């Protein structure tokens, strides 16, 4: 269970508050503010705070004294223009803060995005809960035969069962030994008065990488969209992609015009090299172009074909 | 006049709004939200938006589900502890956005702080107004004789008058020629139908560095405090210090506990090298230490003495 | 003249040095190290130092103990793959440092790229030289009629002459008054013993924005390529584009494999939105698609047509 | 053993190279270039490349055409001045690149320093070696009774033995199961032809946090010194401090004047709040100040006393 009753009460207390503000406010995002949106088996994403709305992008692009907005259609047009031409600074004028609970091996991918502010729970101070990520059966994928960092078919039967057993048992045993090293039980009581217990900053090293951690993570809209374009992509590891997909929905609620422009010009966009564009133009002129006559490398040709066939580029 | 009636109406319209929000809200900052706080002869600082409050720092430091706050005194104590020990990440969890109007030569100092988001009015698109910074008479300082980047005595009489005349005339003439280059009058009408006018991106090069520009500038509380510690310092150039001083007041309204900790542990703090500390301890033990017996360099000794005398360190 | 004899002697002294190193070294870049490559009328770009080569990208991508390189063709293939799929971190492992002399209004565009290290000459300490950018006659462009931030036709005849006269005279006068404000002549002697002179940090405000400044600017290869993709683009202002073009040549000398991949997959690349790709596929299938039947907006359709026609996208 | 014979041969091949360069070169750092400097039981730090020297700091501070250096004593004086007054940008002009092997739980602390470039070995592609950090007996510390994130006395006898057994067994078992999940043996051969093996990106989650990883890590001197001031501090966790200490020695070899200034003004420096300074002045004037008469909080008073007693500040 991701949220215990005390935590749920804390969340409800926040949601029961109502303040009066002169700031730009987005009712659709207020609606889900503070709620734990579940991800994976024990994880969640919570929107904790936000600054700005679609209008704030327009306001900054125009460096205006007022809201900077005109007609809705004009504003959306400006936002689409900014997105299409990668004028990124106005999108930096919106900010959002999440509380995320996620497995450590995913946190290690996530933290590579450096343009964000982070406060992670510290296992030098605190004892980590007995919560581990165990893949759902349909996510127990084999190594891809064709992609060195991808997944292939889903494991089944005895092999799948054995995999889950190993993951569960090793996580549980490591955590049980972690508590023994600390010489504490689940209620924080000393286990064995004759022992002193290992320092927390050392004992944590015995935990497995699927142990859940949590953090506050804050970033601006431009960097968030960059994060989402990489992590909501079909090539991203499933376990981070599901976080990105939930966050995409929070972006849609928050800044619908920016979200629409992002979906059209980033998520759905494809890039062709100059050489690919030349081939395209020959094809449009009626020529039948083969790999050999294209001048493209084998891998590029395959990616080019895949793109035109509507599959995600290689 | 920094704000014209149309701009003032835009501001009043924003201030007349009121929304209901679940977000952390700070009445003292709402009170001045959107207002143009005057700086120098034509400049201003406006708080446009903010995210978080003192509680958000505490909440992030504790990675809590609720507000994270306990007793006011405990929270203030935690904030003081974080500030004293330079645990900076929780302070990054608050964000603020300003609209600033300032002379270009000051904007060039300001922009050196890279960890911020900026949208400046572009003179490739827009025509800059006929507004220049002219120092007040008591700021017409001579070059310092002892500090290569500081100010000395204030100029007086004929010399002061001549300085102001030159600054005013050159600014005015450059701007008049700028309009002539653009072939536009103040109302945006063509000056001379027989000419085409120079591109805006070129004509702007004729303006002087005291011309006012404006931007949206957004940063987190940690980086803002770093900016203020340098720019509100007595060694900062007067023309940027007055902006920092106004911004300090907005910080005090926004996050009073953080502000108090910052004032005590940063603004008022002094740093001694290991060698200086050793001298201090000898002095406390009753020894009379001279420059010669101190082991400090001449400049360090002077700075050490100045610090103990309560003047700002060199 | 961008470089005086004393500066030239300093440069020659650096170029006459030779050290023995175990570091990755690039003879083609050593060849031009320290040289002032001229840009505009008084500006230059000098490569001052560099770290890494094509091999360093491969080495980091493979996290190898040795150079990490295999066959030249394999390395180039990996570099092309990394560039195509925007795996940017290995490109951050190369670093370069430039000394650049450029007009202040261009420096203000340039500094917007925040992920770089900068040391600019300070007019709080130093007196700026009497050097201004004056456009060459073929760069005296009118405002574009169709693009709010672009250039149109070149001015000619009397209008061109008048423009150059205004720019030259205002720059010269402002600088002459700057020296008068400082109460110094060109040799650093006091002009008038009865005056004290204005502080340097104030007097500089009288200078025009075409005055030359200079800085040391250091960045990694990834961020440099991002800078160049924006500033060597046909939409960039001419006065910054000429700097980017000179820097592109230094990149070609430094990391030829990275440069080739960048040229193919970035400089020459085009991006189509999902909607544009759908239209493309219909066209490839033999359909005649019109603006109306395309579903694209007017501006997007125009950009789409321009891209297929081989002109730079809008 | 941190380095196997093939890796050692790669390193020796790099060290046997010698190139001619015009760049600033530091013989003392060349001497140890590429060598694996051992840290902990299986870790190391290797300097892979560097840019600049003490002179590069001076050169950038002076924005000079040549090396920018004058007399050695003048240069050292300028460097000390820059360090003392936190003029940090010239220190950003030197860059260094390390190859580091370290336990994952330490990598997670380290990566919090965001202003650096990183390429880590990816367990989505590669299989991690069977190497774990196991503390030396004198580092098996208990939780501190007085500091929530520190260490207390060293464990001894049976308890120490039990701790080491648990850590070793859980690491070994988790790694053995990791290989079983992958269905590979140590030579990369399939273990069991009837199974397909779990994807690498999933199997890695079974590893414990003391498993070694490695990365290329590149940063500038300013940010490196900031990292070292925090991580070489007595409050830093021992397992990261030992890396920082080895890196301090590489800094001393690389930029001895910067290192000396850093040691004097940062590592050995203490900061007093305004209130503490006031107390100090009263003490120097002969007054006996008690906690009560000081006006300081209990914790601040204790820190103040500890500082004057020469122990590390609280």
Image (cartoon, coloured by chain):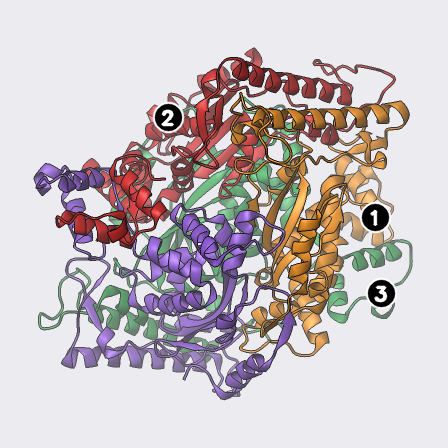
Chain colours: A red, B green, C purple, D orange
Tell me where residue C95 appears, x and y as whole percent: 52, 60
Q: CA distance from mark 3 to mark 1?
A: 17 Å
Which of label 1 and label 2 is nearer to you?
A: 2
x, y percentage for residue C175? 39, 79
Quarter of the figure with residue C259: bottom left
Tag 1's secondary structure?
helix
Residue B86: percent from the left, percent from the top? 65, 43
Mark seen at residue A29: 2
Q: Looking at the image, can residue B312 be seen?
A: no
Nearer the camera: disc 2 or disc 3: 2
Subunit under mark 1:
D
> Can residue C108 be seen by looking at this rendering?
yes
Q: Do labels 1 and 2 touch, CB within 8 Å? A: no
Query: In the displayed structure, does residue B109 sit left or right of residue B303?
Result: left
Where is B275 relative to B196, above or below? above
**C240 relative to B160 in the view: left or right:** left
Residue corresponding to mark 1: D308
Inter-mark Cα distance, 2 to 3 = 63 Å
The span from disc 1 to disc 2 (Cα, nearest Å) is 53 Å
Q: Quadrant of residue A213?
A: top right
Q: Quadrant of the C terminus of chain A?
A: top left
Q: Nearer the viewer, residue A118 or A267?
A: A267
Residue at x 17%, y 74% (from the top left corner): C155
Residue occupied by mark 3: B294
Residue toward you, C255 or B81: C255
Secondary structure state at the residue bearing disc 2: helix
Asked if the residue under mark 1 is in contact with the one under mark 3, i.e. CB atoms within 8 Å, the reply is no
* Chain holding disc 3: B
Residue that extends furthest to the top in the rendered view of this protein:
A5
Mark 1 vs mark 2: same chain?
no
Q: Are marks 2 and 3 in contact (CB under 8 Å)?
A: no
């Amino acid at each position: 269970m991701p949220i215990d009753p005390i935590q749920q009460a804390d969340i409800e207390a926040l949601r029961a508050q109502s303040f009066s503000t002169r700031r730009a406010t987005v009712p659709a995002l207020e609606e889900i503010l503070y709620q734990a949106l579940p991800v994976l088996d024990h994880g969640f994403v919570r929107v904790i705070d936000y600054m700005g709305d679609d209008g704030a992008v327009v306001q900054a692009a125009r460096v205006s004294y007022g809201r900077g907005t005109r007609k809705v259609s004009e504003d959306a047009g400006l936002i689409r223009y900014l997105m299409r031409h990668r004028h990124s600074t106005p999108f930096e004028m919106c900010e959002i803060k999440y509380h995320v609970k996620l497995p450590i091996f995913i946190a290690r991918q996530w933290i590579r995005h450096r343009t964000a502010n982070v406060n992670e729970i510290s296992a030098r101070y605190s004892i980590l809960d007995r919560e581990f990520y165990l893949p759902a059966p349909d996510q127990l994928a084999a190594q891809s035969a064709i992609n060195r960092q991808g997944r292939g078919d889903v494991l089944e039967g005895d092999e799948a069962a054995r995999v889950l057993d190993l993951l569960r048992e090793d996580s549980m045993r490591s955590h049980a030994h972690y508590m023994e090293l600390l010489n504490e039980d689940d209620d924080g009581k000393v286990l064995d008065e004759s022992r002193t217990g290992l320092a927390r900053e050392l004992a944590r090293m015995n935990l497995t990488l699927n142990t859940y951690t949590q953090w506050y993570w804050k970033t601006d809209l431009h960097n968030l969209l960059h994060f989402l374009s990489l992590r909501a992509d079909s090539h991203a590891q499933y376990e981070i992609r599901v976080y990105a997909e939930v966050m995409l929905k929070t972006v849609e609620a928050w800044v619908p015009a920016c979200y629409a422009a992002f979906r059209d010009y980033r998520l759905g966009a494809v890039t062709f090299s100059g050489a690919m564009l030349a081939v395209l133009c020959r094809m449009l002129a009626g020529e039948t172009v083969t790999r050999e006559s294209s001048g493209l490398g084998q891998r590029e040709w395959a990616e080019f074909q895949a793109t035109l066939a509507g599959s995600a580029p290689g």
